């Protein structure tokens, strides 16, 4: 089976297609922005990568969301809920983790099916 890599670098690819499944690397926002802003930026990057891979948020299978602080859960969810409204919600897990630096507040990892 063919594996297609999108925006491949020396350490990782931003997206990988294997068969009819698309795997996205964790998407983040601009360091120092609010959770709201970082979530919006990450979701915009997800939409762009899914489009490049031949899919959309209508075909999400799984989302893993890492927050630097679970106190930001409701703020992130407000953006997520607006973004996913009217589309099929994926299976999802959300947890707290140390990210690259404390300036990164949210990271979102997606698995989707091709359209």
Image: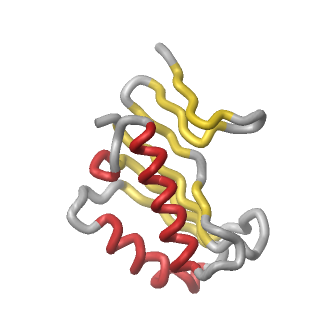
Q: How many marks?
A: 0
At x 64%, y 79%, the residue is 33
> Which quarter of the image is occupied by the C terminus?
top left
Give the image location of residue 102, x and y in percent.
76, 75
In the image, taking residue 24 as reference, residue 57 lies left or right, namely left
Residue sitting farthest toward the top? 1
Task: In the displayed orientation, state which residue is furthest to the left.
Answer: 86
Front residue (pair 45, 112): 45
Q: Measured along the vertical axis of the image, is residue 11 above or below residue 90?
A: above
Q: Residue at x 46, y 83 (%)?
A: 74
Relative to residue 49, is residue 13 drawn left or right?
Answer: right
Seen at 48% across and 30% down, the residue is 17
Give me the residue at 34% from left, 73% from top: 81
x and y, in percent, of residue 3 in the image: 53, 21
Camera-side residue of 110 and 6: 6
| Above or below for 25 versus 66 | above
């Amino acid at each position: 089976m063919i594996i297609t890599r999108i925006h491949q670098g020396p350490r990782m690819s931003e997206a990988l297609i294997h068969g009819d499944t698309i795997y996205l690397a964790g998407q983040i926002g601009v360091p120092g922005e609010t959770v709201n802003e970082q979530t919006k930026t990450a979701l915009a990057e997800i939409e762009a990568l899914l489009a490049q891979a031949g899919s959309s948020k209508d075909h999400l299978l799984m989302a893993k969301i890492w927050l630097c602080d679970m106190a930001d859960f409701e703020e992130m969810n407000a953006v997520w809920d607006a973004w996913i409204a009217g589309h099929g919600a994926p299976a999802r897990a959300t947890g707290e983790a140390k990210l690259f630096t404390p300036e990164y507040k949210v990271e979102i990892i997606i698995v989707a099916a091709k359209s």
